[in-house]
Structure formats: structure tokens, C-alpha cells
Amino acid sequence: MKNRISTLLVATLMAATSASAVLAAEDNAKQAAAAPSGPSEAVQKALDKRTKAIVDSLEGVGAALNADMFSAEFNKQATPEQVQQAMKQLRDSVGSCKLAGRINSPAPNATAYLLDCQKAFVPLEIGVEEKAPNKIQSLFFRASFWRLGAQ
């Protein structure tokens, strides 16, 4: 009889624990759905536009970078000429590049892209101001993933 009561008690506790775990998972899912996930449509368009300008400039086919493209805070850290010089060094290292894809980001005003270059894949992270004209406030070219046999 004692064994039956213990087994029944354990089964009841396990069922209660499972039910609270399911409720907690449902609550977490509701919170995740309610929280904003990634840039708004307008900011995403601005990110795509700014990224295209950066890649065009990297390839030498677009307009030269200028201070109006970057936020005041960014311009305090680096001039457009310094950014252009760094991008020239990158291009000299990895070859010609094109956009390969966008990586979804939970950040409201930033995202990442993957550049497909002749010698490597280069992750590019970019952030813009949330309000128009959505100037670039952060720009990072991450470490390259070299193509096998391309180095």
C-alpha cells in the first residue's frame, strides 16, 4: 500500500512539474512574440540602401563615401576617407565582392550581411539611426572566411 501511495505521489508531482514547464514555455513564447524582433520595414530598407552604397563604394562603382552618410558620432571616430582606405585594403586582400545575403538580426536598427568575394566570404555588420535619414552609426567588416585554396 505504501508503494502505491509513493508511486501515486511521484506521478502527481511529475504531472504538476510538467504542467508548469508547459505553462512557462507558453509564457516565454508569448513574450517573444510580443517583443519586437529586428528592424522595422523602413529601417530595413535604409539598411539595405546604406549597405548597397558601401558595397558599391568598395567596388569603385558607386559614389565616394561622404560625411553625410554617417552619423555625427561615427564621424568623430573615423572620417569617410579612413573608411574608404580600410575598404580598399579589404578589397586588395579578398578581391571583388558582391552581396550574398542578409542575416536576420533581433536588433531594431542593425543587421548583418555576407559578402561573397573572390577569395573569401566577409561578414559585414551595419547599424543605422532609427529615424530618417538613417545615417550609418556602426560599420564592421568581420574576419574573413577564406575559400579553400584561395589564400
Image (cartoon, helix red, strand yellow):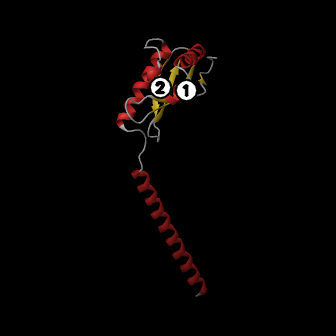
Nearer the observer: mark 2 or 1; the answer is 1
How far, Cα to Cα, is label 2 from label 1?
A: 10 Å
Q: Amino acid at mark 1?
A: Lys
From the top left corner, tell me how far across and down residue 40 is, in percent.
37, 39
**Residue 145 position (above or below residue 31):** above
**Residue 18 position (above or below residue 89):** below
Q: Amino acid at mark 2?
A: Phe
Residue closest to the eye, 99 or 3: 99
Residue closest to the eye, 114 or 13: 114
| Observer able to see residue 138 | no
| Tag of residue 27 | none
Q: For the residue labelled by badge 2, is the local secondary structure a helix, a strand or a loop?
A: loop
| Tag of residue 70 | 2
Q: For the residue labelled by badge 1, is the local secondary structure a helix, a strand or a loop?
A: helix
- Find out whether the residues at labels 2 and 1 contact each other: C-beta distance under 8 Å: no
From the top left corner, tell me how far across and down residue 141 is, in percent.
56, 26
Residue in view at x 47 percent, y 59 percent: 25
| Tag of residue 76 | 1
- Quadrant position of the N terminus in the picture: bottom right
Residue in view at x 57 percent, y 21 percent: 120
Q: Is residue 41 left or right of residue 75?
A: left
| Observer able to see residue 82 | yes
- Quadrant position of the C terminus in the picture: top right
Residue in view at x 51 percent, y 76 percent: 12
From the top left corner, tell me how far across and down residue 115 is, in percent.
50, 23
Q: Is residue 101 left or right of residue 41?
A: right
Residue closest to the eye, 129 or 112: 129
Q: Quadrant of residue 7 in the image?
A: bottom right
**Residue 21 position (above or below residue 119):** below
Circle 1 packing at 10 Å, graded few (<14), some (14-19), many (20+), is few
Residue in view at x 61 percent, y 27 percent: 143
Q: Disc 2 or 1, which lies upstream in sequence?
A: 2
